[in-house]
Amino acid sequence: MNTIGPSKVILDHFRCPAEFINIGVGGEVSPEPGFFKFGSDLICYGKCSGLSPSPTFSRSLPDALGGARLEQGVLSLPFHLSEVVETLRREDYTTALGHKGPNWAQNRLLRTGYYSARPLLPVSVRKYFQRLAFHGWRTVPFPRWPVDTTVEEIIEFVVRLVLGEGQHQPIPFVWFWPEGKQACAIMTHDVETSQGRDFCDALMDVDDSFGVKASFQVVPESRYKVPASYVTNIVQRGFEVNVQDLNHDGRLFDDYAEFQRRTRAINEYAGLYKARGFRSAILYRNVDWLNLLQFEYDMSIPNVAHLDPQQGGCCTIFPYFIGGILEIPVTMTQDYTLFHILRDHTLDLWREQSSRIMARHGVLNFIIHPDYLAQDKEMRIYKELLAYLVDLRAKSGLWTPLPCELSQWWRQRSRMKIVKTPEGWEIAGEGKERARLAYVKFENGKLTYDL
């Protein structure tokens, strides 16, 4: 056995004492990564010992569970847990699925032409091309639509092995959300046109009428003017301003040198707007380049990206760090996708996604565009959504902060520790007065949480 020691990914997720989680890797792992199962239905991607991972996804993958052993108080796994989780969060598996990068626009010339003509195209024409591009999306095997919680399921399954096979003592940890809230929801508004910009004041009125504050992601150049009075008004009303791309032309990640040039301008706008968060246009992304952005957090990686130009998905419903930037994944289907691609004007999909995320105490991250709410039908659905969130807040313990408040909490939590005192376990660290001590235990064949 080698690499014995506590698993960082579990300690980061639960903020629990290291003494409870001792994990090692047994045997030499395969030279190349690939897909394999861990148990009956958990899909992993990475290097593994005792079997040959599949270079491509299939329904009949080799199962690595047989390689898990408990030896002298240390759980031996046939793979590096942190590596497997990071390959999902960073979407490294997408290369093996054949769609690393913008899948429907691999041809740069075609993509440039589309985004150049996009402002001139009627919505009906754009919707036609988009539906054509996403044809067959329901057959994409992985991640799982409409919410993928593979990262959480892998972490919880490993903790089950630790608790079920060795120590039955419950593990103390820092609960995920302040004041014992059961889950978190953030509302974000991407402003894409001058019409959307001009509708923001009315949209803030709607949000305020439900007691829900939101962030507005503005495009600094080319799309529309961003007057200082516009930014000031949003902030003074208790909302948040973030930066969305540079000019929304779909080419931010085409070339590293160009990305460096654009990033310098983006960071200047971050200072000008006092923006703490970033989102890329069309949710294009390259996590290896994010370190050039001078933001506290990013909101550009979807949980499941079947209906986005760049397919993939981070397979998690919790925030996680990419270097110094906190990634808050987009976990809810966008309003444009719901209304115009799926042609659904009900809350059914959003309710299903919310229910699944709430059950695992994750983050509901919505993208609602002011540009698409001018019609009565869309505004009616949006108000129904806000009423639904308010009901969850009152009855189910949903926390509805601004994204910057979520970021502040998650950073504080990431530095908290559980310490042993004569009176028992306690939480130490900045923000501990808002934190709640919880326990994870294995009962009746499943993990349970006690606050």
Image (cartoon, rainbow, N blue to C red):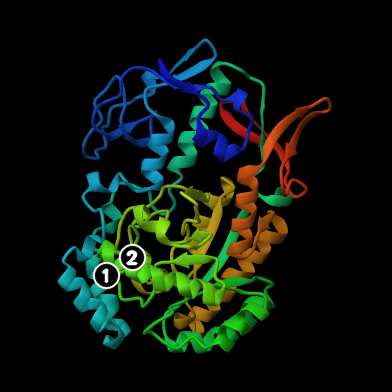
Badge 2 density bin: few <14, some 14–19, many ≥20, Cα 10 Å: some
Q: Which amino acid type is marked by label 2?
A: Gln
- Disc 1 marks a residue whose amino acid type is Arg
**306 displayed left or right of 23:** left
Q: Residue at x 25, y 64 (%)?
A: 255
The picture places residue 75, in percent across and down from the top left corner, at 49, 19
Sequence-wise first label, 2 or 1: 1
Residue 443: x percent and y percent?
62, 26
Q: Which residue is mark 2?
A: 260
Quarter of the image where one finds residue 102: bottom left
Q: Nearer the viewer, residue 240 or 146?
A: 240
The label number, if any, that marks residue 131 in the structure image: 1
- Secondary structure at badge 1 equals helix
Q: Characterize the local packing of mark 1: few (<14), some (14-19) or many (20 or more) Cα atoms within 10 angstroms.
A: some
Residue 303, quarter of picture: bottom left
Can you give x and y, in whole percent of width and height, for residue 215 in the image? 56, 71
The secondary element bearing badge 2 is classed as helix
Q: How many marks?
A: 2
The reply to whether residue 287 is visible in this rendering is yes
Relative to residue 370, is residue 417 drawn left or right? right
Quarter of the view holding residue 26: top left
The quadrant the C terminus occupies is top right
Picture residue at 24% right of the left edge, 38% below the top: 58
